[in-house]
Amino acid sequence: MNFKSRTINARYKLTELDRALISHIYSHKREVSETKITSLAKAFFTVPNTITRLCHKLGYDGFSDLKAELKHELSDTTPENLQAAMLLKNLGLIDKAREAKVVTAFRKARAVNFYAVSQTGLIAKICVDNFYALDDKFLFYTYPNKLLHRIEHADNEIFFFISLSGETESVVKLAEEARAQHQTVVSLTNLTENRLSALADISLFCYTKKESVENYDVTDKTPILIVMNSLFHTFLER
């Protein structure tokens, strides 16, 4: 798990000062990786303990641990095999604690309803078929009206939305409706702050970069398969 993913996972615990410090670190990784904790604290008119607490919120042992990870990220910005680097990054994003929460919710739910659109929907359907092979309570919806009807009449069900951007309007609206109906919402999105992950009771993340060729979306969807396959095997093991 890298610095960016740690900050997103911890976003609900962060203060305004924490966010300002994180923004500074994003923009000055090399400088921060070589600075002293006292110097950084002084620049923000605070004390070193504030920065140490932020490090702990992000899952680091301390400021030295944070600096070590920043140095590692800076030295690995141009890997020879970008595809391999992306796959490794997604494997590092897998959060077993969150997976366990999702699987526990799966076990208790009467049904688990998945929804995604366009190319993401094609990939998601493959993943859901694996779950369906184990239990027919796992369902994939293609049409928003059918899912909306399900949301409005569901009892003890889960609604799992997948959108790389986390901003696909039709997906976000259905997630909002599910929350309004007090249903459990799970999301899988790209590693960004987005509306869908903010709505979810449990948010999962993958990492990919948006790509297009002649205005056609060719963004790599493999990260969805990585995260969903890991979730499937956690469900299988339990």
Image (cartoon, helix red, strand yellow):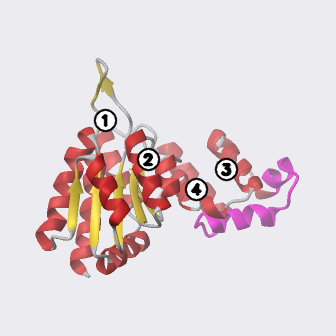
In the image, 197 versus 159, the foreground residue is 159
The relative height of residue 138 versus residue 143 in the rendered view (above or below) is: below
- Residue 15 image offset from top left, x and y in percent: 73, 59
Q: Amino acid at mark 1?
A: Thr
- The residue singled out by tag 2 in the image is 173
Q: Amino acid at mark 4?
A: Thr
Cα gap from disc 4 to disc 2, whole angstroms: 26 Å
Q: Secondary structure at mark 4?
A: helix
The earlier-in-sequence mark between 2 and 1 is 2
**Is the residue marked by circle 1 packed among few (<14), some (14-19), or many (20+) residues within 10 Å?**
some
Cβ–Cβ under 8 Å for marks 4 and 3: yes
- The residue singled out by tag 4 in the image is 7
Task: Please say whether residue 112 is one of the residues in the magenta stretch.
Answer: no
- Residue 77 image offset from top left, x and y in percent: 46, 40
- The residue singled out by tag 1 in the image is 219
Cβ–Cβ under 8 Å for marks 1 and 4: no
- The residue singled out by tag 3 in the image is 22
**Magenta residues (range):** 38-62
Closer to the camera: disc 2 or disc 3?
A: 2
Q: Is any part of residue 118 visible from this angle? A: yes
Q: Main secondary structure of the magenta part?
A: helix
Q: Amino acid at mark 2?
A: Lys
